[in-house]
Amino acid sequence: MSPMPETQPGAPLLAPSWAPRPWAPYACDPARSRGRLYPEPESLTRSPFQRDRDRIVHSGAFRKLKHKTQVFVYHEGDYYRTRLTHSIEVAQIARTVARHLALNEDLAECVALAHDLGHTPFGHAGEDALAACMEAHGGFDHNDQALRILTQIEHRYAAFDGLNLTWETIEGLVKHNGPVKSPYPTTLQAFRAHWDLELDAHAGLEAQVAAISDDIAYNTHDIDDGLRAGFITVAEMRDLPLVGPILNEVLGQWPGLEQGRLIHETTRRMIDRMVNDILAETRRRLDQLRPASAEAVRAAGRPMVTFSDEMQPQQQAVRKFLYDRVYRDFRVNRMRRKVRGVLTDLFDLYMDDTSCLSPEWRAQAETGGATHRARTIADYVAGMTDRFAIDEHRRLFDPYHKI
């Protein structure tokens, strides 16, 4: 990582034409952002967080999410969620929650859209494969890889590597799941020497909103995808907490409703109930703490945005059901085993013979020792889409395939 200039605290924008909302005092105010690592002139038409969102949406890594696995590999069906559609759903939920809590919707959306950028092809199976490959070279973690993408790998701007996002967006990405404890992942360990992200504290409310919106999104859309795939049935969910009562309510109102409408009606009501539960619990906690600033939220020592004690076990039961019946279904396990082999084969081949890399990546891989080479190859493999990884494996390992 090249030397980074010290950041200057952000000052209020000069006569901006973007109209600030009446944010709560504990929201992250873009006019008081802590700034960017590389100082840039501010925009009069977009707030700093709006610019961050736009940079994320226009990044190459974001576009690649279209062909990266959520649960099902891309060729298994056009209707299953991908990392891209999942991220858009998370962002929609996050904006809704942020709006009702008088938080900054743009910042919540930034973290939601960026939270999965570091995922490998083939979802967690791909991450497991790369983590094993990188065990002797600093490891691999998708959250750390997202930071690497946003601060180093994206090469779009003349003045700097990465997207030069604001402190609040980077903090939210790194800490959206809570404080980060030592030992820190490789990229974060190096980055913290340039910017203090206050890793021992919780992130701002907007990042907390994005994190819990992720939980809501995958609990609901993985039920939808699991039913479509035939891994689970409506009948066996009738006794499942949260889902069952809603299913029975819908069927009581519309007996004999076709499955497609039944699934959608059920999952949309699930989202509504979880969102309303979060809003009520978060308001209760904010009323107790009465934070006067975003810094007071970070110093609270506990998350402010969370499910109630009544909802928490219900959504955890749904999560466990999905883990047992969908994520670990034998058909998913077979595909997981297959795709782990694909990424391991590619990594090992590139490590053994960098001449099989494209000229740009080969030049980068050969500028350092074994650990540098491994990290470069991990960047390359992690950035692949499912489709490219499968095609590349065929090109390199199938003797009958034309190169």
Image: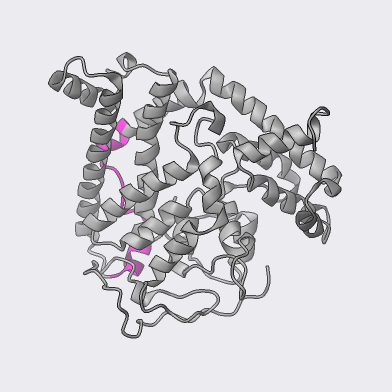
Instruction: Residue 243: tell me if it is visible.
Output: yes
**Colour mode of the rendering:** one colour
Task: Name the residue at 40% across, 18% down.
Answer: 232
In this view, which residue lies farthest toward the bottom?
14
Relative depth, front residue between 52 and 402: 402
Q: Position of residue 48 (x, y in %)?
A: 41, 71
In magenta, the rendered stretch is 293-314
Q: In the image, 241: left or right of 114?
A: left
Q: Any magenta on residue 384?
A: no
Q: Is residue 197 above or below residue 72?
A: below
Q: In the image, 3: left or right of 396?
A: left
Q: Quadrant of residue 109?
A: bottom left
Q: Position of residue 397 (x, y in %)?
A: 80, 31
Q: Quadrant of residue 235?
A: top left
Q: Where is residue 74 in the image (x, y as percent from the top left)?
A: 54, 33
Instruction: Residue 343: tell me if it is visible.
Output: no
Q: In which quarter of the image is residue 236?
A: top left
Q: Position of residue 357 (x, y in %)?
A: 79, 49
Relative depth, front residue between 262 and 246: 262
Q: In the image, 145: left or right of 400?
A: left
> How many badges with numbers are in the image?
0
In this view, which residue lies farthest toward the front?
402
Q: Any magenta on residue 308?
A: yes
Task: Name the residue at 17% across, 23% down.
Answer: 249
Query: Quadrant of the image for the C terminus?
Result: top right
Query: Quadrant of the image for the N terminus?
Result: bottom right
Task: Name the residue at 59% across, 36% down.
Answer: 122
